[in-house]
């Protein structure tokens, strides 16, 4: 079968779609460049024409997913009256999107791998910091509204909230038990808020 040309219309999008599917199914390490190009019947030259490496393709997908998640979340909270409502929306939105569980797992695999490129590391930190800043923003808003005690360490609380949200979905998925995710998140957020009424950090 004739391979598709490098400059075929939408080739970049086809590569991204194929890579996303394979990364989700097989993980980052187990997905090769050969797997990706075979999926859409193209050549290595086609992939390298659009992306410097498999790592750069993966990072691009992570960046796009992160932006998409944030856009969706900010749309969801547009009509919220206060931070508590925003936190409950965060829980519901996370339950609906499953915090993009497959890529959450693969991201951990990717970051634990041997890749130490300064460019890649810089992009990973940027993605992580952008995601973290959403949680810090919520904590700061909660402090202003006196929902959260002002003598707490905002940075610590943001990190705790972020990891609670990620951890609930990750562990719920891994157990294989059919949890009510929205109820899990609501309980987690209620417990988090209860603990932040007095100084804990």
Image (cartoon, grey):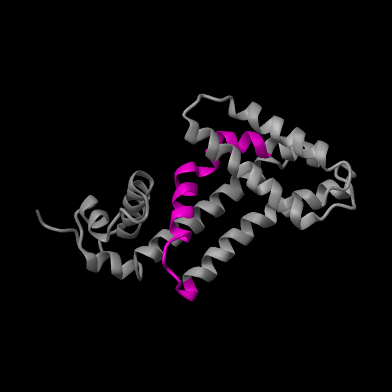
Vertical order, 182 against 140 (above or below)? above
Residue with the most extreme left position: 1
- What predominant SS class does the magenta segment belong to? helix
Q: Quadrant of residue 155?
A: bottom right
Magenta stretch: includes residue 100: yes
162 or 56: nearer the viewer: 162
159 or 200: nearer the viewer: 200
Q: Which residues are magenta?
A: 90-119
Residue 69 in picture, x, y percent from top left: 57, 47
Q: Residue at x 59, y 59 (%)?
A: 128
Vertical order, 116 against 185 (above or below)? below
Q: In the picture provided, is 47 more to the left or to the right than 151?
A: left
Residue 166 in picture, x, y percent from top left: 59, 44
Asked if one can make out residue 97 in the rendered structure from this viewpoint, the answer is: no
63 or 166: nearer the viewer: 166
Q: In the picture provided, is 185 more to the left or to the right than 45?
A: right
Figure disc tally: 0
Residue 13 in picture, x, y percent from top left: 35, 55
Magenta stretch: includes residue 30: no
């Amino acid at each position: 079968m004739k391979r598709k040309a490098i400059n075929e219309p939408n080739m970049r999008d086809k590569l991204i779609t194929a890579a996303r599917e394979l990364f989700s199914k097989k993980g980052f390490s187990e997905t090769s460049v050969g797997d990706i190009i075979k999926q859409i019947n193209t050549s290595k030259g086609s992939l390298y024409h659009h992306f410097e490496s498999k790592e750069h393709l993966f990072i691009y997908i992570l960046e796009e997913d992160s932006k998409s998640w944030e856009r969706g979340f900010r749309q969801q909270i547009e009509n919220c009256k206060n931070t508590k409502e925003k936190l409950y929306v965060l829980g519901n939105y996370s339950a609906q999107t499953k915090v993009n569980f497959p890529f959450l797992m693969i991201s951990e695999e990717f970051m634990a791998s041997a890749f130490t490129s300064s460019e890649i590391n810089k992009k990973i930190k940027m993605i992580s910091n952008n995601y973290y800043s959403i949680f810090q923003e919520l904590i700061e808003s909660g402090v202003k509204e006196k929902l959260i005690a002002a003598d707490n360490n905002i940075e610590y609380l943001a990190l705790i909230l972020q990891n609670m949200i990620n951890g609930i979905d990750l562990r719920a998925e891994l157990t294989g038990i059919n949890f009510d995710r929205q109820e899990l998140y609501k309980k987690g957020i209620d417990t988090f808020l209860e603990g932040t009424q007095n100084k804990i950090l």
